[in-house]
Image (spheres, rainbow, N blue to C red):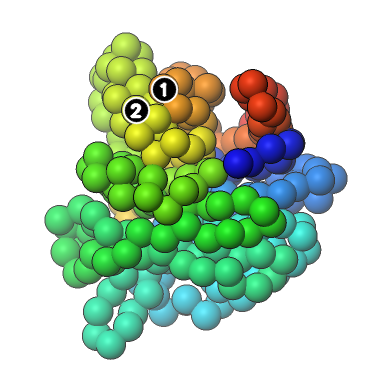
Amino acid sequence: MLRGTITIAMLQDRPGTGIRPAFLDILDRTSLDILALPEYYFVEPCDESVLASCFRKDSVLNQLKEISSVLNCALIGGSLVEHIDGAFYNRSYLIDSGNIAGHYDKIHPYDNEGRGLIRPGNEYRVFPVRGIRIGILVCADVLYPDSFSNIRGLSPDLIFVPTTSPYRENESRPTKLKRDHRLFARGAETAGAFIYKACASGRIAGHRLQGRSLIASPGKIEWRIPPEQEDRSALIVSHLNIYKSGHRLDIEVYWE
């Protein structure tokens, strides 16, 4: 069972911007264990579809390796489109100190994701990295309760969820919080793990997004981006201290 203090950072930002120098400076001064990026973080503003990112896959992967190496951390690299044997997958890489530790392919893509060409992955995965069992789900995977029950069988300590969340006009605060509890607090309870959701903001392929980054423990939303700040870019640094009788979470938020 996981014990001790883990320093975990998440980025909520616009796809295609890269990590801002000010955020990189903060990360460089932080004794970081894990950094998580949003889904499709390397899709460029000019891309008409997320599929375009597959042509930059090698370049993006090299960037991810360099970030992980420079910061000496485990990196959940958001996700990118991988083209394999004529098929497209939404793939999230886990990289530790510049080395690929594994990857996960999104099992529940949206029907129209990548113009309907993104195929579902076929395996839930948990990776032992730095004494931590790290699971990954991607965006719409959380809409299916079986995602959490299946990954529970792999005994994760932490589950990271890179996400691009569509803008919902005039959605009330109570509605947002109720949905978060239903999906993430219950999901964490089902999986028996802490959940870190790193959400993109801005726009992607012409569609407006809302940054709904959050942290959940079993049965509880521990922290969430304030609803009135969902459009903003932010670096979230959390210190998760897990001990025998419970846990403590300290959070610092740095805004754009």
User: Quadrant location of the N terminus?
Assistant: top right
Q: Position of residue 241 (x, y in %)?
A: 70, 30
- Residue 219's tag is 1
Q: Position of residue 156 (x, y in %)?
A: 49, 47
Circle 1: element type: loop
Give the image quarter of residue 218: top left
Q: Residues within 10 Å of mark 2 (few under 14, many from 20)?
A: many
Give the image quarter of residue 148: top left
Residue at 37% x, 69% y is 81
Circle 2: element type: helix
| Position of 112 relative to 194 (above/below) | below
Q: Residues within 10 Å of mark 1 (few under 14, many from 20)?
A: some
Disc 2 marks which amino acid? Answer: Arg
Disc 1 marks which amino acid? Answer: Gly
- Residue 186's tag is 2
Residue at 32% x, 83% y is 84
